Amino acid sequence: MSEFKEQMMMCSEDYNELIDMALAMKDKEWFEELVKRQKRLRELEVEMRRLLGVID
């Protein structure tokens, strides 16, 4: 449950360090998963901003 809460608290920029770590470790599977999650989170962030009327 705590892992779920931690993921819910992350913003898309938080994935950058993890992606760098995956690259340094040459872990292709983890890298691909992180990039996929980051992309989806960015999409959700944009959608939420639009719904809330907050445009960057």
Image (tube, rainbow, N blue to C red):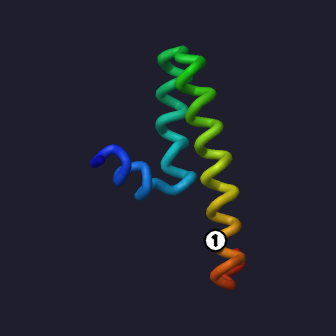
Tell me if 3 is positioned left or right of 56 in this view: left
- Does 8 appear above or below 53? above
Q: Residue furthest bottom?
A: 53
Q: Residue at x 48, y 35 (%)?
A: 18
Q: Residue at x 28, y 48 (%)?
A: 2
Instruction: Give how far across and how far down residue 49 sits, in percent.
Output: 65, 74
Q: Residue furthest front?
A: 1
The residue tagged with tag 1: helix, strand or loop? helix
Residue 42 falls in which quadrant of the image?
bottom right
- Does 24 appear above or below 3? above
How many discs mark residues in the rendered view? 1
Circle 1 packing at 10 Å, graded few (<14), some (14-19), many (20+), is: few
Residue 44 falls in which quadrant of the image?
bottom right
Tell me if 46 is positioned left or right of 8 in this view: right
Instruction: Give how far across and how far down residue 24 sits, in percent.
Output: 50, 20
Q: Residue furthest top?
A: 26
Q: Residue at x 62, y 27 (%)?
A: 32
- Does 1 appear above or below 23? below
Instruction: Give how far across and how far down residue 53 sits, in percent.
Output: 68, 84
Q: Residue at x 55, y 52 (%)?
A: 13
Instruction: Give how far across and how far down residue 50 sits, in percent.
Output: 71, 76
Residue at numbered disc 1: 48
* Image quadrant containing the C terminus: bottom right
- Does 41 appear above or below 55? above
Amino acid type at image mark 1: Met
